[in-house]
Image (cartoon, helix red, strand yellow):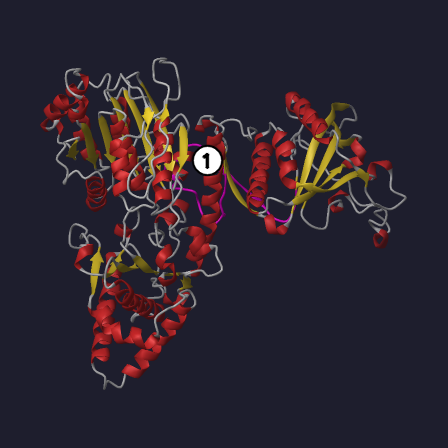
């Protein structure tokens, strides 16, 4: 299918376990102004998905999401332009399979060139390269639909690239003989330099390119933005993009904080976002940190090695983790006959000396246990078996039908002896590669080499004796190598963490789900991503990402039990008019009743109330319609809305109480020197004598329901300090009471109108 002459038909996947479905004719590209275009699901994509081990439902989801992403990319007919998109998945959720499917779909739709920037190290780059080669069957097929070039070397590959791309322009070349060029390249400035040089003298004027950046938040963003400079890898990415007249740049990541918080005028700032759906067997943050049967276990602070707390022998928690792992291996040998893999990851600090110490401990423990189990007369055998029984009891809490303890003990020696131990760091030069086929069970000990992007096959037990570190949310999350498609054996999984790290993961999961929800909601509007409000839930104990890539500072807003109200609702005449109109519309048709109170109250102290109102309705029809122009007010009001939205996600039927203060009449307030309302609330009455304070009126702060959210609507006449003359009449304002259970922290970054809430 040559680019420039496309007529698209979507082919639903026939084949194994998948019924033939209807064929849908899609209108072609005759109208060059028609957007968006409709990709075709062709043989390359169908073959890829059918050969995968994905379920039918997962195949459909993978296909549909790839179509939706490519649909937002530049058209393959060579019309020009560029797009930048953000593709967000969970850690270990199948992002590589997603962009492999996208590459296959690009081939089906006439993209001549696909470039995948993968990994900042040789092992990670090789891991991605081999996955692509395997899934696209580049080594086993003989139809030559693909030309794969890894880490191009300048002009050495230029002639091959030129000849291959020329075939796409030549109408005499049959479509089935045109080869799609797949370039894989390490994310390193020298490797990117070579790629740029290879493409520099090639005519790419009408060549649509799909450019995929795996782990896009790492290395490629500008680390020198605050110094007014450009980091080297960032420069190379910008140069590469600048040399591709027609391209789509897709940023794949599980931690989108960096791409979302860089300046929206940055060349790498995404213009659209897509959120990937994991398969049914995926187990992620909610499974590990939010459920009742959490597989997370604490490492006591006394067993975390530090400079002031050096460890001289293996800690008890490590021994327990090893026992859990070896029992799981024994069970796997009995259940699976040694097919697949079971692995354990020991992930201490980044210091290689620490890795060696844990590695040597595990070697000694392994040898000792094998010696004891081999000798039935060893007096230590009874004690060792009892220690394993405690681990067995732990496993029984999460595994139904676990094999009897005596049967597992009979296979323990086999399980321990057949387990291979690996030191995974660069102490001996390059990080060693694991041959997963060499053994059923493996134990990996290492640090940073096993952080981001590293896949551990069959990981069941993770032991991570390290702290939160710098406290960057994206860094913490990227350590979660224990997430993945583990539901079939989730009961065998255990994660050992220092309690503060466990709490950081728990808080991160809340943040992650909030970001995903906001991206999904915004994407459904069809509006560009630069209009997304940058306001996300995030505990104060974590920073969203490294500060070096952010040149527009974010602020934090904290909401605990209590009232929130804007300080300068009068700042904009347009906002006053808009807010009055929004409030008037909201109260139309609503039944309000007089609130209860002392008969001696003044008219100002009597209010109208509407109880048992849908919080979701109030949020959508009132709160999101209000506008506040002063930056602090806009930021804090937006933060309050994020808190309410988070609560509504979990409690969609929540109710609230609405008060129309003073029955809608205006109240007089004086502004302070900062041109703000110093005190919105009227106080208690009477004030004196002290023992009767609040007897008639408890004060505005007490006008709320006993439970849930309460909202007060005020109308104000405002004067400047020292003046009795009213400068601003009938100014609407709002006060929101947030209960204790709804409190939280929000980060807010001003990249445009913070009052844009939809």
Q: Which residue is drawn at 90% across and 44% down?
A: 599
Task: In the rendered view, tell whether residue 77 sits above or below residue 565.
Answer: above
Q: Residues in magenta?
A: 536-563
**Is residue 315 among what the camera can see?**
yes
Look at the image and say whether residue 664 sits in the magenta stretch: no
Q: Residue at x 13, y 28 (%)?
A: 154
| Quarter of image, res 289 | bottom left
Q: Disc 1 designates what residue? A: 519
Sort mark 1 into few (<14), some (14-19) or many (20+) by Cα contacts within 10 Å. many
Q: Nearer the viewer, residue 242 or 23?
A: 23
Q: Which of 324 and 33 is in front in this view?
A: 33
Compared across the picture, whether 681 is left or right of 346 comes to right
For the C terminus, the image quarter is: top right
For the N terminus, the image quarter is: top left
Task: In the rendered view, tell whether residue 547 sits above or below residue 431.
Answer: above
Compared across the picture, whether 411 is left or right of 225 comes to left
Q: Position of residue 212 (x, y in %)?
A: 28, 33
Q: Position of residue 146 (x, y in %)?
A: 17, 31
Q: Position of residue 511 (x, y in %)?
A: 47, 45
Q: Which residue is drawn at 78% across and 44% down?
A: 699
Q: Nearer the viewer, residue 90 or 241?
A: 90
Q: The residue tagged with tag 1: helix, strand or loop? A: helix
**Is residue 720 among what the camera can see?**
no
Q: Where is residue 66 in the image (x, y as percent from the top left)?
A: 34, 34
Look at the image and say whether residue 540 sits in the magenta stretch: yes
Q: Which of 644 and 651 is in front in this view?
A: 651
Q: Residue at x 30, y 33 (%)?
A: 102
Task: In the rendered view, tell whether residue 683 sits above or below residue 448.
Answer: above
């Amino acid at each position: 299918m040559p680019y420039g002459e496309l007529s698209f038909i979507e082919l639903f996947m026939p084949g194994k376990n998948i019924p033939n479905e209807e064929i849908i004719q899609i209108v072609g590209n005759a109208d060059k102004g028609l957007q968006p275009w409709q990709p075709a699901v062709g043989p390359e994509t169908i073959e890829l998905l059918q050969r995968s081990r994905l379920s039918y439902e997962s195949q459909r989801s993978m296909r549909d999401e790839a179509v939706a992403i490519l649909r937002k990319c530049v058209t393959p007919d060579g019309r020009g332009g560029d797009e930048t998109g953000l593709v967000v998945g969970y850690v270990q959720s199948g992002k590589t399979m997603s962009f492999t499917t996208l590459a296959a779909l690009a081939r089906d739709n006439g993209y001549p060139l696909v470039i995948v920037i993968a990994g900042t190290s040789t092992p990670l780059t090789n891991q991605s390269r081999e996955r692509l080669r395997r899934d696209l069957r580049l080594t086993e097929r003989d139809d030559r639909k693909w030309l794969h070039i890894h880490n191009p070397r300048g002009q050495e590959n230029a002639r091959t690239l030129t000849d291959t791309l020329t075939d796409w322009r030549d109408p005499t070349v049959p479509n089935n003989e045109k080869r799609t060029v797949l370039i894989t390249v390490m994310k390193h400035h020298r490797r990117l330099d070579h790629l740029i040089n290879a493409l520099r003298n090639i005519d790419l004027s009408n060549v649509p390119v799909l450019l995929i950046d795996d782990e896009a938040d790492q290395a490629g963003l500008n680390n020198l933005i605050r110094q007014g400079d450009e980091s080297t890898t960032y420069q190379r990415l910008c140069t590469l993009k600048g040399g591709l007249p027609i391209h789509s740049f897709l940023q794949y990541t599980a931690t989108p904080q960096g791409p979302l918080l860089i300046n929206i005028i940055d060349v790498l700032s995404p213009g659209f976002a897509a959120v990937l759906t994991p398969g049914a067997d995926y187990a992620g943050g909610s499974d590990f940190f939010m459920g009742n049967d959490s597989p997370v276990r604490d490492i006591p602070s006394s067993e975390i090695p530090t400079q002031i707390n050096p460890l001289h022998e293996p800690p008890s928690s490590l021994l327990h983790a090893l026992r859990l792992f070896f029992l799981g291996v024994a069970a796997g040998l009995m259940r699976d006959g040694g097919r697949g893999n079971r692995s354990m990851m020991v992930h201490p600090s980044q210091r290689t000396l620490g890795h060696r110490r844990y590695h040597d401990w595990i070697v000694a423990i392994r040898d000792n246990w094998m010696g004891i189990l081999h000798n039935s007369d060893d007096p230590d055998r009874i004690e060792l078996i009892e220690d394993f029984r405690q681990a067995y009891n732990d496993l029984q809490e999460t595994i139904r039908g676990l094999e009897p303890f005596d049967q597992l003990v009979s296979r323990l020696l086999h399980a321990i002896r057949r387990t291979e131990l690996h030191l995974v760091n660069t102490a001996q030069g390059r990080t060693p590669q694991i041959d997963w086929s060499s053994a059923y069970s493996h134990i990996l000990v290492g640090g940073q080499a096993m952080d981001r992007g590293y896949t551990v096959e069959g990981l069941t037990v993770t032991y991570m004796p390290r702290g939160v570190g710098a406290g960057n949310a994206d860094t913490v999350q990227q350590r979660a190598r224990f997430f993945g498609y583990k539901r079939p054996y989730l009961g065998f999984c255990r994660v050992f963490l220092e309690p503060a790290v466990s709490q950081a993961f728990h808080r991160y999961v809340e943040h992650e789900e909030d970001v995903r929800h906001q991206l999904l909601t915004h994407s459904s509007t069809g509006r560009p991503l630069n209009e997304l409000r940058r306001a996300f839930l995030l505990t104060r104990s974590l920073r969203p990402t490294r500060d070096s890539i952010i040149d527009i500072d974010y602020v934090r807003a904290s909401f605990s039990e209590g009232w929130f109200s804007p300080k300068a609702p009068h700042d904009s005449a347009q906002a006053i008019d808009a807010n009055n109109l929004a409030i008037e519309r909201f109260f139309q048709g609503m039944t309000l009743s007089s609130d209860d109170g002392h008969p001696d109250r003044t008219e100002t102290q009597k209010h109208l109330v509407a109880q048992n109102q849908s919080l979701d309705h109030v949020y959508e029809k009132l709160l999101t319609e209000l506008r506040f122009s002063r930056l602090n007010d806009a930021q804090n009001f937006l933060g309050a809305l994020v808190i309410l939205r988070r609560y509504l996600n979990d409690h969609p039927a929540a109710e609230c109480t609405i008060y129309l203060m003073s029955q809608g009449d205006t109240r007089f307030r004086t502004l302070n020197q900062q041109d703000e309302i110093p005190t919105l609330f009227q106080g208690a009455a009477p004030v004196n004598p002290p023992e009767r304070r609040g007897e008639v009126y408890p004060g505005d702060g007490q006008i709320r329901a006993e439970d849930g959210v309460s909202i007060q609507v005020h109308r104000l006449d405002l004067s400047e300090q020292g003046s009795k003359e009213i400068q601003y009449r009938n100014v609407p304002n709002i006060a929101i009471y947030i209960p204790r259970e709804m409190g939280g922290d929000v980060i807010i970054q001003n990249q445009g109108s913070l009052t844009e809430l939809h």
